[in-house]
Amino acid sequence: MRALSKIVAFFANWLFRREWPGLRVGLATAYRSHLDATRYRPTALAQQLLISGEDHRFFSHGGIDPIAVCRAIWRGIVLRRPEGASTIEMQVVRVVSGRFERSIRRKIREMALATLVSREIPKRALPAVYLEIGYFGWRMNGFESACRRLHLDAHALSLAETACLIARLKYPQPQEAPPNRWHKINARAQHLLRLHEKHKDGRTYIGLVMKAQYESV
């Protein structure tokens, strides 16, 4: 999977030579903010649940997950059930670039630029960086903002609280959440807990930065 990403990165570096410098600055800024974070640094558990729910082959690819891409194409064309294939790198590109339009062109651009992300942010730090800039809902841009708004102690989050928080990345909480949104958030949280139980004893989280390692990131 990494070989494909290297090939794409070679062409992306040329195709997006005008756009990459600006995105590179945004990525560098996000990484510096991550290194400076103290009180509201995302927990290892939050990062684990993010990987389980959004990109469980995260440490096996270089920005593009070809298995997820093929599955999304198959389900979209054959089963008529649209499905995303975004990796954490792709989601970081989306947030930093501020481009959220629904189009194939944006998706292809996102995939290409995702292969360049690790040049600015170490792979092992990306889950935390994404949590620090991700959108959790109304007035909840980033992990710190979400914890404050939901009155959560970032250092003492239970497994269930963390799952409900990460679930909001898929189903952001609006200012006035209708009952069906709460149902989706809770259902997503339960799904994340099942995935975490499945992945916790394997190699899914093998490259994560634990709390004691932050000094050397």
Image: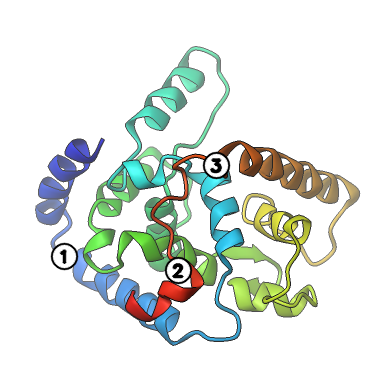
Q: Compare residues 140 and 88 and report the one nearer the observer.
A: 88
Residue 113: image x %, image y %?
A: 27, 54
Circles 3, 1 touching at the beta carbon (< 8 Å): no
Under mark 3, the amino acid is Asp
Q: Quadrant of residue 92?
A: bottom left
Q: Nearer the viewer, mark 2 or mark 3?
A: 3
Q: Quadrant of residue 60?
A: top left
Residue 140: image x %, image y %?
A: 66, 72
Crowding at mark 1 (Cα within 10 Å: few <14, some 14-19, many 20+): few
**Above or below, 157 relative to 28:** above
| Residue position for label 2 | 129
**Above or below, 126 relative to 4:** below
Examine the rendering and report whether any part of residue 139 can be seen.
Answer: no
| Residue position for label 1 | 18
Q: Secondary structure at mark 2?
A: helix
For image coordinates 67% across by 44% down, the residue present is 192
Q: Compare residues 26 and 146 and report the one nearer the observer.
A: 146
| Residue position for label 3 | 201
**Above or below, 57 relative to 117:** above
Q: Compare residues 145 and 176 and report the one nearer the observer.
A: 145
Q: Nearer the viewer, mark 3 or mark 1?
A: 3
For image coordinates 49% across by 12% down, the residue present is 78
Under mark 1, the amino acid is Arg
Which quarter of the rendered picture does the N terminus lie within? Answer: top left
Which quarter of the rendered picture does the C terminus lie within? Answer: bottom left
The answer to which of marks 2 and 3 sits earlier in the sequence is 2
Q: Secondary structure at mark 3?
A: loop
